[in-house]
Image: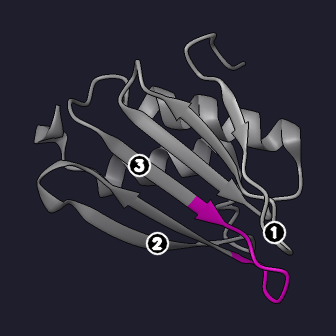
Amino acid sequence: MLSSACPVIGLHRRRAVPVRYNCTAMGVTVELENLGDAQLCQEIVARVEHAFSDKKGEWRVSIAGSRESESWEMRVAGPNGFERTYTLSRAAEEHTPEAIRRLILQLVPANAS
């Protein structure tokens, strides 16, 4: 569930409708594009917030779906030039909110808190 500190801002483009969840109180901005399911998006945002709950600095997570493939591209950016990308595979069950949270925890160094 989204907290009141996380207003939902819809950004409209020609063929895609990315949704940006700006959780400034927590220092994480989540941008989701072409994922196709509003409930899934809310669950992903909640898990991403949880993954960054003990991290300092400003973080940005973007996940973009593709109509051409079953893969999603995830990008995590943070302080001190931190940036990682990862391809989330549906076949490997990496499209679930919990799998995304676990992957973020693996990508982001523990000393980032």
Which residue is painted at 82% across and 89% down in the image? 68
Residue behind mark 2 = 86
Please tell me how crowded label 2 is: few (under 14), some (14-19), or many (20+) other residues with Cα within 10 Å.
some
Residue 79 lies in magenta, yes or no? no
Which residue lies under the disc numbered 3?
Answer: 60
Q: Is residue 65 magenta?
A: yes
Up the image or down, 69 lies above or below 64; here it is below
Task: Tell me the element at label 3.
Answer: strand
Q: Is residue 66 left or right of residue 92?
A: right
Q: Residue 113 carries which label?
A: none
Front position among marks 2 and 1: 1
For the residue marked with disc 1, what is the amino acid? Ala
**Horizontal and vertical percent position of residue 33:** 72, 61
Magenta range? 63-71
Q: Distance between the residues labelled 2 and 1?
A: 21 Å
Residue 16's label in the rendered image is 1
Q: What element carries label 1?
A: loop
Q: Quadrant of the N terminus?
A: top right
Question: Which one is earlier in the sequence, the residue at label 2 or at label 1?
Answer: 1
Q: For the point 65% across and 24% down, which residue is it?
A: 7
Q: Is residue 14 left or right of residue 26?
A: right
